[in-house]
Image (cartoon, rainbow, N blue to C red):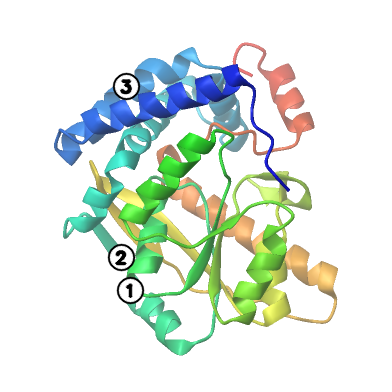
Amino acid sequence: MAQTRPPFLQDLAWRLQAAAYDGLTALLRLFPVDRVSDFGAWLGPLIGPLTSLHRVAETNLRIAFPEAADAEIASLLRAQWQEIGRIIVEYPLLDRITAEPGRVEVAGEQRLAAIAAGGRPVVFISGHFSNFEAMAWAIVHAGVPCQMTYRATNNPYFERRIRQARYRYGVRLFAPKGLASARELLRALGRGESIALMNDQKYNGGVAAPLFGRLAHTAQGPTTYALRFGIPLQPMSVQRTHKARFRVIVHDPIELADTGEREADIETGVKRINAFMEARIRERPAEWFWVHRRWPNEVYRAASAASPASA
């Protein structure tokens, strides 16, 4: 079926956005990586509080840390905008970051090597921790055949540039998110390839599992895949060590129990994933992506009623 051409003005807007990205990329690539990262850390707290996402981030922090004083929340808000600013401007430079020895260290390389050599796939899971693209690079760099999910952008010209940027640092396998992705991921696992999914965002219709003491709807897909193929969940995370330097951590695998009670087993698996995510966030709260609405709407309504000025 032929694709429908977008309206002229929409297509023009998309092209202008892509051109602006090209100009910004060309400019950023003129400077040393750490200077660019520091620029992002300056820019993020300048622009972020002017957006509606600032209110979302503040409310999320108060939901997660109800005991925190206002000064601590303000400090975390600024720190997470610094982190977001760094991530945004680092994206066009990821090929340079990953190519420079010592900028990305991997804790648990032997585990990735064993996955690459063992022929038994895994379901990689992670969240939006610091510059999470470093995890994709670590998986590919270790030689693990892996399908990595992503959410395509509406702008096809910008989407092409995102793929090209990932190609430059070695990430070439993609399974688009959506209804069609399930079959593609199942086929990949059947071929002995691993799959990688982010599992820390709200998923309407997912399993309601605790996260910071509140039920959060969480995608059951990773757990379902792992149970179906009898393979482990392989958690990973990333930490910023200094400026544009990172530590990718390959954590102990999560072996799921298959009792034959599929719904109960899936719920147990999702709870273990959320417990992993919460532990990582508590370790380094400024490095998580606080600007999306993670909990159900009623949690935000309650937070708004409790603190009208900040929710």
The three-letter amino acid code for the residue at tag 3 is Leu
Residue lying furthest bottom in this view?
118
Residue named by callout 1: 109
Question: Is 279 positioned to the left or the right of 243 in the image?
Answer: right
Mark 3 highlights which residue? 43
Q: Nearer the viewer, residue 92 or 34?
A: 92
Q: Looking at the image, which residue is at 17% across and 59% down?
A: 102
Which mark identifies residue 106? 2
In what element is the residue under mark 2?
strand
Mark 1 residue type:
Glu
Q: Quadrant of the C terminus?
A: top right
Residue 18's place in the image compared with 308, above or below, is below
Q: Position of residue 240 (x, y in %)?
A: 31, 47
Picture quadrant of residue 305? top right
Residue 276 coordinates in the image, percent (x, y): 55, 59
> Which SS class for mark 1?
helix
Residue type for callout 2: Val
Residue count near mark 3 (Cα–Cα under 10 Å), binned few <14, some 14–19, many ≥20: some
- The image position of residue 137, as x and y in percent, is 36, 60
Q: How many marks?
A: 3
Which residue reaches farthest front? 2
Front position in the image: 13 or 306: 13
Q: CA distance from mark 2 to mark 1?
A: 6 Å
For the question of whether residue 289 can be seen, the reply is no
In primary-sequence order, the first of circles 3 and 1 is: 3
- Whether 155 is drawn above or below 287: the answer is above
Of callouts 2 and 3, which one flags the residue occurring earlier in the amino acid sequence? 3
Q: Are marks 2 and 1 in contact (CB under 8 Å)?
A: yes
Q: CA distance from mark 3 to mark 1?
A: 34 Å
Q: Is residue 200 visible?
A: yes
